[in-house]
Image (tube, helix red, strand yellow):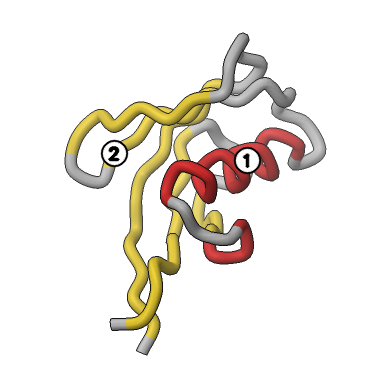
Amino acid sequence: MRKSMRIIVNVIARARTESVEKLGAGMYKVRVRAVAERGKANDAVTAVLAAYFGVPRRAVRIVAGRTTSRKMVDIDVGNA
């Protein structure tokens, strides 16, 4: 059985640096350099979160908020 976690992410696009900051239980702030157009920032968010949690990029899925700066993200973290 796959184990996953769901987090809420506030995204800041066009940032100087890419980073992940934990704000609280299940809440993160993600800064990405990409612009928020044509899915570029969403692609960058999945890449940055995958690196932060040490999972493959395919394990990170945006399940809500694809067109807003506040997103709900599922991350597959392995087998239970």
Q: Is mark 2 on a helix, strand or loop?
A: strand
Which label belongs to residue 27? Answer: 2
Foreground pick, 12 / 32: 32
Residue at 66% x, 16% y is 14
Quadrant of the rendered image containing residue 10: top left
Which label belongs to residue 67? Answer: 1
In the rendered view, would you say 76 is above or below 34? below
Quadrant of the rendered image containing residue 44: top right
Foreground pick, 37 / 47: 47
In the rendered view, would you say 16 is above or below 19? above
Q: What residue type is labelled 1?
A: Thr
Residue at 50% x, 59% y is 55
Outermost front residue: 54
Residue at 52% x, 31% y is 69
In the rendered view, would you say 56 is above or below 8? below
Q: Where is residue 26 in the image (x, y as percent from the top left)?
A: 25, 46
- Left or right of residue 48: residue 7: left
Looking at marks 1 and 2 on the same chain, the residue that comes earlier in the sequence is marked by 2
Q: Which amino acid does label 2 sit on?
A: Met
Which quadrant of the figure contains the C terminus? bottom left
Q: Where is residue 35 in the image (x, y as percent from the top left)?
A: 73, 23
Q: Position of residue 68 (x, y in %)?
A: 56, 36
Outermost bottom residue: 1
Q: Position of residue 65 (x, y in %)?
A: 53, 46
Outermost top residue: 16
Q: What element carries label 1?
A: loop
Mark 1, residues whose alpha carbon is within 10 Å: few (<14), some, or many (≥20)? few
